[in-house]
Amino acid sequence: MDGERKLEILTGAAKYDAACTSSGVNRSALPGLLGNACSGGICHSFAADGRCIALLKVLMSNDCIYNCAYCANRASAEQPRATFEPDELARLVIEFYRRNYIEGLFLSSGVTIDADTTAVRMVQALRLLRDSYGFNGYIHAKVIPGTSPQVIDQLGLLADRLSINVELPSTASLARLAPDKSIDSIFTRMAHLRDGISNNRQNLLEWKGRRESRRSLTAAAGCDSCATAGTCTGLAACRSAQTALARPARFAPAGHATQMIIGASPESDYEILKASAALYSQYRLKRVFYSAYVPVGDAALLQQGFAADSNDITLANGNGAVQLVREHRLYQSDWLLRFYNFSVDELLNPDAPFLDPLLDPKCLWALRNLDLFPIEVNRASFDELIRVPGIGVLGARKIIQARKAAQLSFDTLAALRIVMKRAQWFITCKGKYRSGLRFEHDSIYHSLTSEEARKRSYRQLHKREQASRQLSLFEGEFDHKGEFDHKRESEQIGLLC
Amino acid sequence: MLIYTYDGSFEGFLCCIFEAYTRGEDPAEIAAAQGLQYRIDQELRGVPTIEERWQRVRAGIHHKLGRLTWQKLRACFCASTPDKEMLLYRYLKQGFARGRVATDDILHPDILPIEELYRSVGNEQQRMIMFARFAHIPEGVYCATINPKHSVLPLIMDHFAARFNVQPFIVYDEVHQLAGISERGEWYLSAAEGLCIPPASFDDQEYQQLWQTFYHAIAIPGRRNEKLRQQFMPKRLWKNIPEMHPAH
């Protein structure tokens, strides 16, 4: 099989993995090494589906022995199989990186033979990259469930970020749809990562302390040879301090993450977000990624996906478009949990366990808590401001900066790029509510949703027109608007995808 | 009507600030001498670029408004907006008169335009960092051609020079006819009128082909979203982005 065909197969096999971030770690460039890493992450291209491409996202192999029902690469699926040679993959990364196509590598794999054999092959490729090719860019490696801790430790010293997929939001669904994966092993390995990362951080702190004390020691003892040359032939005390000075290697400096598939199993949004919150707090994850389920191949049972809420007509058909809106609402909620100090129980509860497809979760929360509004933008604290729909972290900072000089009005807020369409309902300026608006639940809900509904019906109309004119190449257009807002929000916070 | 002319460099512009400040003048326009259209009612004054003077202005900005504002002004000077000098001049006038209170007053009519311009230049800088595409030419140098709307080359060379310190490379801004040349982590700019970049090596064409293959294979079929793609990757930049060209 030629290299191009192999790349095509192993990329296609990785495309449903949600994570493509290159964020979380700053690593300066070093003379003689290729690359560096920026903690905000850098995208390099955008695919036809609008998703960002930051990393060369491929599988080491799609020749998998497992038979997970939701997965395109399951053993029973009929499709071409391929496997990269470690050197073949390493060279591809280097050549792409040199041309500024990519920010680094995202490497996952189907399970060939067994977990450790698979992971060791990944380690080989990464070691070639780091040691033989002097690659100093970003690497995200997926930990195959069941990999032994020793092999994970090797991976962690080569990669910036590691991730273990929980795959599904509950253990019951996991047992049903991924019968080959041991649930216990997923969580014990996740705990192993958490501890490895925090131990490593501790070691680095201690090392920094030792370095400081050596500096003061040499300064006090007047041993300046090591201060300049880095090696000391002078004081015995200084020499012994130096032997303890080797910088510990960094273990997964960009932390660890996970992914769950949305809509292949019956959990509610409330249960999903509860699971995420628990993952964040118990395993100290950097990110939970949500991947809208795409029915692939012959998994008849899952062909339609699960309806999120059987009462909700818009969600009930379970097609790709609907799942994408849901995925997007979950990302927005996830953002609220991590950057806006919301708790899951503020957003949803067991009696109302689903997010509203027509309304972003912050609006949904604000409408349920109208007694907290309207707030006065000229006096509100930062924490109050970021809870206002239409005001993000950046917007709140700008408001606080600008109101030092002058009282803000509705007009000047728009100049600060606050999303007035949403914010205007929840604020007062100089004590006054915006004239012409009624501070009342139904009119707010109507105004905030009718706009989306209008857009949607326009798009459907447009699509119908197109379809009548030509054969549609692509099925299932979806709500772009929401997706874009999410991206813009993440861009503002400097964490673009 | 008093017009200051200068050599077009940022240092030259700072000398105009010095000139206005020390003479207590308020020029109606500050413009690069090159390409200036003279009108009969204008009194032109050529302002010389003198290091001691721009260093003093620089120190003044650092001292009074801080390092971040300095960087902001430096970036805004890269804008291709024709009246950028006057926007910067008015901003600095406010800044020198009222200090950081002025630069915090982001809604003030003399401050807001620079905030907006900074945003625009910053976005363009980020886009060039994302989308500059290098090709390996037979001489062993990597070359990228970019077409930014602002002249952001000076703002992106640090990034590429550090990252690609193991390969000599050139970034050519075909719009502003400027080239950034880098080797072993060092870089410099050079005027480059009509620079002709040799065609990519045979190997390079192969990697372009592989990259296109990857690009097409990574998209999820059935979720095509042209609007979103163009939101992030504007069409005006496609001509220098190989994956946006039809497969060869």
Image (cartoon, rainbow, N blue to C red):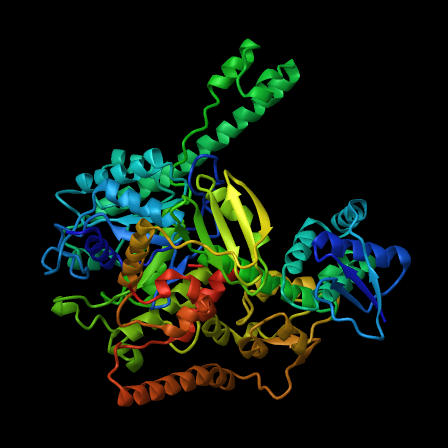
Residue A289 x %, y %: 35, 58
Q: What number of labels is visible?
A: 0
Residue A398 is at least partly visible in this image? yes
Left or right position of A62 against A440: left
- Residue B196 or residue A214, whichever sits in front: B196
Residue A70 placement (x, y as % from top left): 19, 62
Q: Position of residue A284 (x, y in %)?
A: 40, 47
Percent position (x, y) of residue A236?
A: 54, 9
Closest to the observer: A338 or A373?
A338
The residue at the point 41 percent across, 57 percent down is A44
Q: Which quarter of the figure is the C terminus of chain A placed in? A: bottom left
Residue at the outermost right position: B23
B145 relative to A30, above or below: below
Q: Is residue A342 visible?
A: no
Closest to the observer: A293 or A5? A5
Tell me if residue A412 comes above or below residue A445 in the rendering: above
Question: Measuring 12% from the left and 69% from the top, which residue is drawn there?
Answer: A300
Judging depth in this view, the residue of B84 and A9 nearest the camera is: B84
Position of A336 relative to A365 (above/below): above
Q: Which residue sits at x=65%, y=70%?
A: A377
